[in-house]
Image: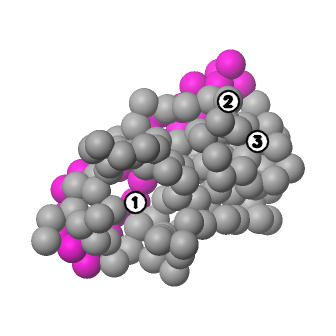
């Protein structure tokens, strides 16, 4: 079993930046794709970004492309999400997820392990 714990959320003004981290424990993560999803109040959870096991492949949602960057450090068992040029519509609970895959899945149902999430609030 893999446990995932997110950190780094908070409140920021529009145009600001935040860096989220997700630390993994309890199992192998170097063979797993790691992803970030978010869920705003009253909305379904949606895909944000994913990175393959060796960092060689990344996929982003159109709404965050060129503003967010996903990266990973397998030695530290951690995945990061650098968020720049934040907008009020980025406000959500951000969760990381993991799945053993050679690809970068974008659907919630394709991931096996989930963290509890961290709140990101962007004020206008």
Residues rendered magenta in the picture:
1-27
The residue tagged 3 is 32
Q: Is any part of residue 7 visible from this angle? A: no
Distance in Å between CA atoms under marks 3 and 2: 10 Å
> Residue 103: horizontal and vertical position, in percent?
81, 53
| Quadrant of the drawing holding the N terminus | top right
Which mark is on residue 19? 1
The answer to whether 10 is drawn above or below residue 16 in the figure is: above
- Horizontally, residue 94 falls left or right of residue 35, namely left
Mark 3 / mark 2, whichever is N-terminal: 3
How many residues crowd mark 3 within 10 Å: few (<14), some (14–19), many (20+)? Answer: some
> What residue appears at the point 43 percent right and 49 percent down from the top-left corner?
38
> Residue 52: horizontal and vertical position, in percent?
76, 55
The answer to whether 18 is drawn above or below residue 95 in the figure is: below
> Residue 70: horizontal and vertical position, in percent?
57, 62
Q: Are marks 3 and 2 in contact (CB under 8 Å)?
A: no
How many residues crowd mark 1 within 10 Å: few (<14), some (14–19), many (20+)? Answer: some
Q: Secondary structure at mark 3?
A: loop
The residue tagged 2 is 112
Q: Residue placed farthest to the right in the image? A: 102
- Residue 15: within the magenta? yes
Mark 1 / mark 3, whichever is N-terminal: 1
| The quarter of the displayed image where residue 57 is located | bottom right
Q: Secondary structure at mark 2?
A: loop
Distance in Å between CA atoms under marks 1 and 3: 21 Å
Q: Is any part of residue 24 visible from this angle? A: yes
How many residues crowd mark 2 within 10 Å: few (<14), some (14–19), many (20+)? Answer: few
Q: Are marks 1 and 3 in contact (CB under 8 Å)?
A: no
| The quarter of the displayed image where residue 93 is located | top left
């Amino acid at each position: 079993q893999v446990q995932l714990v997110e950190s780094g959320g908070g409140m920021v003004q529009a145009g600001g930046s935040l860096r989220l981290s997700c630390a993994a424990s309890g199992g192998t993560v170097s063979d797993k794709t790691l992803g970030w999803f978010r869920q705003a109040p009253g909305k379904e959870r949606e895909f944000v970004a994913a990175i393959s096991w060796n960092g060689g492949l990344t996929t982003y949602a159109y709404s965050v492309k060129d503003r967010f960057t996903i990266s990973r450090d397998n030695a530290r068992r951690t995945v990061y999400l650098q968020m720049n040029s934040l907008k009020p519509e980025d406000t959500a609970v951000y969760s990381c997820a993991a799945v053993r895959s050679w690809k970068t899945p974008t659907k919630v149902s394709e991931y096996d392990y989930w963290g509890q999430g961290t709140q990101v609030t962007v004020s206008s």
